[in-house]
Image: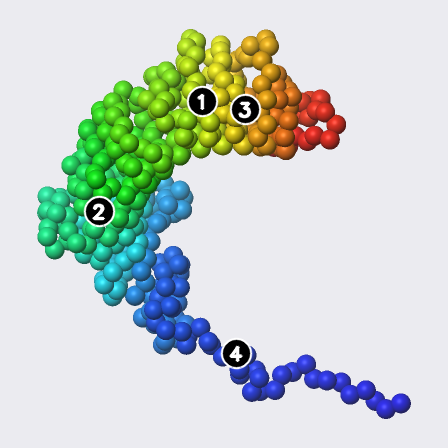
């Protein structure tokens, strides 16, 4: 028998050359710049070492994302001052080399405050003429007394005729720890016909805010901890999401909100939970996603009237302030939502909250997914099992997210044992996931 000829696994040279051919570099500059725009700015800059073809491409990126939030978490003490100097130098160098006349995105996120005002002004004056679409200024000062305040020249720059056409391109504006007044925010709302998202976080100068306009396209509005805010008036026919975290003394005046589908309300510690429902009562029948982050005081007994939540599909309740002797009305929320698909409940594991001796049976035919954090209560679980006939999963975590490093750690074994005991009592074929 002749010898079997063994084929070589080595490809001919011309096939190897074809295989190693750099086809990506043959793409047009516009496509390559778009690809680099999907990367973080540091990663895009590193592409310059690939070849002469790539050396300057990153300078035409449409996204300048200087988000250093991961670095912030690792900093403390003197290192913050050193890293801040590096951060400022990095941003300045990139802006100096950037060549594209327009931008899709500009983000700044680092420890910066009033000491850096001149530098931040320069960055804003650089980016506004570039017809930026997404603008996010996230400054995290060491003290609220040193918040960055735009200079008068910077204010005038926003309103100059040469920049007016540029800010019209804004689709998303996010300002965090920036001292701007309500007048400037309303100016953006009036002159940015494509603005769909507005996020305001800890703005110290806003007292009254009017979010309205005949051509307003705003779809998502988020307001967090603007502690001097006294009144909010909004009439936004395209608004889909409204999120508010702050005190409940604020006066709310709402106009036409036909598309409002997601409501996220966090009430501060010094007010009753009813605030989260009452101002929006006429819109709750249209809401599909509802999140209530509430504080219930020790003597809380008021039970708000629950309207019909006919379209509600996702309900999240995060209840602080317990031990509260009564936690009476969350089952009423469930009963008012016949289309509910998922329910998430969080409360501290030290809760002394009690449920009524008898929970009135009520069918929850659509409910499929339940998550419970901290409040491990057998009566509640059995109520859900008996009434949610199509329930697919219950997930129980004995810890509330805020308890993991707190005094409630001592209750770990007791709470875990209670959760596991519940799992043993379940009907055959049903499972509970205990984290």
Q: Evaluate whether residue 34 shows in this view.
A: yes
Q: What crowding class fits label 2: few (fewer than 14 Cα within 10 Å), some (14-19), or many (20 or more)?
A: many
**Location of residue 181 with respect to 228 vertically, above or below:** below
x and y, in percent, of residue 34 in the image:
36, 64
Q: Position of residue 212 (x, y in %)?
A: 22, 36
Is label 1 in a helix, a strand or a loop?
loop
Residue 224, placed above or below residue 326: below
Q: Name the residue under label 1.
A: 308
Mark seen at residue 264: none
Q: How many other residues sit within 10 Å of disc 4, few (<14), some (14-19) or many (≥20)?
A: few
Q: In this view, does 53 lie above or below 386?
A: below
What is the total number of numbered labels drawn onto the structure image? 4
Q: Does label 3 or label 4 sit earlier along the sequence?
A: 4
Image quarter of residue 369 = top right
- Name the element at disc 2: loop
Is tag 3's residue or tag 1's residue first in the polypeptide sequence?
Answer: 1
Q: Mark 3 points at which residue?
A: 374
Q: Do the residues labelled 2 and 1 touch (CB within 8 Å)?
A: no
The circle drawn on residue 20 is 4
- Compare residues 373 and 118 and report the one nearer the observer: 373
For marks 2 and 3, give the CA distance.
44 Å
The residue labelled by disc 2 is 192
Whichever of labels 2 and 4 marks the residue nearer the N terminus, that label is 4
Q: Which label sits in the foreground, 2 or 1?
A: 1
Q: Which of marks 2 and 3 is in front?
A: 2
Residue at position x 26%, y 48% in the image: 194
> Where on the picture, by quarter, is residue 253?
top left
CA neighbours of label 1 inside 10 A, class few (<14), some (14 to 19), many (20+): some
* 375 on left or right of 60: right
């Amino acid at each position: 028998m002749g010898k079997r000829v063994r084929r070589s696994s080595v490809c001919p040279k011309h096939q190897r050359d074809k295989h190693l051919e750099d086809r990506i570099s043959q793409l047009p500059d516009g496509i390559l710049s778009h690809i680099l725009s999907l990367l973080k700015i540091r990663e895009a800059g590193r592409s310059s070492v690939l070849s002469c073809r790539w050396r300057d491409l990153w300078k035409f990126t449409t996204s300048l994302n200087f988000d250093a939030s991961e670095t912030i978490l690792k900093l403390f003490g003197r290192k913050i001052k050193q890293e801040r100097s590096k951060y400022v130098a990095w941003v300045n160098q990139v802006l100096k080399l950037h060549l594209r006349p327009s931008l899709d995105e500009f983000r700044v996120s680092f420890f910066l405050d009033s000491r850096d005002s001149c530098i931040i002004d320069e960055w804003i004056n650089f980016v506004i003429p570039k017809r930026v679409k997404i603008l996010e200024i996230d400054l995290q000062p060491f003290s609220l007394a040193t918040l960055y305040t735009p200079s008068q020249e910077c204010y005038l720059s926003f309103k100059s005729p040469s920049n007016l056409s540029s800010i019209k391109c804004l689709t998303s504006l996010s300002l965090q720890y920036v001292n701007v007044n309500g007048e400037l925010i309303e100016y953006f709302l009036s002159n940015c016909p494509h603005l769909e998202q507005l996020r305001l976080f800890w703005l110290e100068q806003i007292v009254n805010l009017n979010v309205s306009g005949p051509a307003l396209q705003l779809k998502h509005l988020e307001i967090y901890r603007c502690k001097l805010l006294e009144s909010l008036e909004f009439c936004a026919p395209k608004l889909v999401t409204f999120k508010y975290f702050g005190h409940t003394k604020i006066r709310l005046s709402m106009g036409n909100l036909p598309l409002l589908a997601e409501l996220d309300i966090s009430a501060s510690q010094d007010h009753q939970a009813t605030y989260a429902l009452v101002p929006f009562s006429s819109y709750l029948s249209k809401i599909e996603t509802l999140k209530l982050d509430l504080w219930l005081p020790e003597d809380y007994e008021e039970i708000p009237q629950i309207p019909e939540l006919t379209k509600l599909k996702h309900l999240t309740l995060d209840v602080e302030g317990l031990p509260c002797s009564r936690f009476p009305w969350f089952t009423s929320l469930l009963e008012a939502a016949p289309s509910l698909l998922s329910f998430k409940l969080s409360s501290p594991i030290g809760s002394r909250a009690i449920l009524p001796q008898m929970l009135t049976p009520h069918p929850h035919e659509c409910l499929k997914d339940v998550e419970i954090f901290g409040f491990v209560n057998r009566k509640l679980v059995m109520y859900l099992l008996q009434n949610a006939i199509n329930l697919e999963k219950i997930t129980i975590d004995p810890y509330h997210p805020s308890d993991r490093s707190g005094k409630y750690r001592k209750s770990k074994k007791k709470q875990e044992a209670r959760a596991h005991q519940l799992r043993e009592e379940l009907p055959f074929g049903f499972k509970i996931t205990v984290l």
